[in-house]
Image: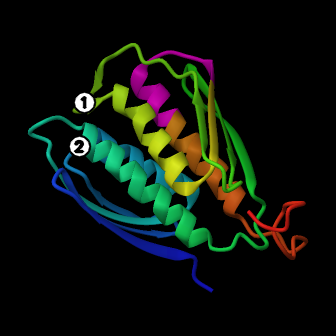
Amino acid sequence: MSRMATVERNTKETKICLTLELDGSGKAAVSSGIGFFDHMLDGFARHGLFDLNLKVDGDLQVDCHHTVEDTGIVLGTAIREAVGDKKGIRRYGSCILPMDEVLVLCAVDLSGRPYYVSDAAFGAPMIGELDTETIGEFFYAVSYSAAMNLHFKVLSGGNSHHLCEAMFKAFAKALDMAVAQDPRITDVLSTKGSL
């Protein structure tokens, strides 16, 4: 059974169409109008082995905030829809990922309860055309729309480009682990009986 979701979101600020396949091969076709953000989303797909198609038309003449945040909302919604009833999945995932001098820990719980925690601090205000203040907004939106706990801990900081890339890749690896199916889990991994 394919674990795929297509989500569209149209507002006065953004028009977004996203398709996510959890059991993919890491292929991405991404166009947000923000080059570095596209690079991060491509890395997310490639390192999580997700297939991702994304087209965003946002009000970039204002700034990149709406485009980045709304993409997080749509990606989180797609994750929630694609994972379905969560029967048989591992639920938890984590990754400690190095990117040169940077070391980032990411932990995910597909608990049905949204929560976002991060201590990431960027030394540069911009990476290409991406405002670094929007990186936290993106992951916050993903966590709340997906109804997941999402935590980042920067174990060793440094270059802002490296830090952002480590966060996206670590999230990809942690999410891939959390959505993986385990034949030993026959229902949902919860004492409540539902997630």
Q: Identify residue for label 1.
A: 128
The residue depicted at 57 percent of the width and 76 percent of the height is 3
Q: Identify residue for label 2.
A: 34
Outermost residue toward the left?
61
Quarter occupied by residue 195: bottom right
Which element type, helix, strand or loop, lies under badge 2?
A: loop
Across and down, in percent, residue 177 comes to: 71, 56
Q: Which mark is residue 119?
A: none
Position of 192 with respect to 43 (left or right) is right
Q: Is residue 50 visible?
A: no
The relative height of residue 145 versus residue 106 in the rendered view (above or below) is below
The residue depicted at 18 percent of the width and 50 percent of the height is 13
Across and down, in percent, residue 183 comes to: 86, 75
The residue depicted at 76 percent of the width and 73 percent of the height is 87
The relative height of residue 1 versus residue 176 in the rendered view (above or below) is below
Q: Closer to the camera, 50 or 112?
A: 112
Q: Are marks 2 and 1 in contact (CB under 8 Å)?
A: yes
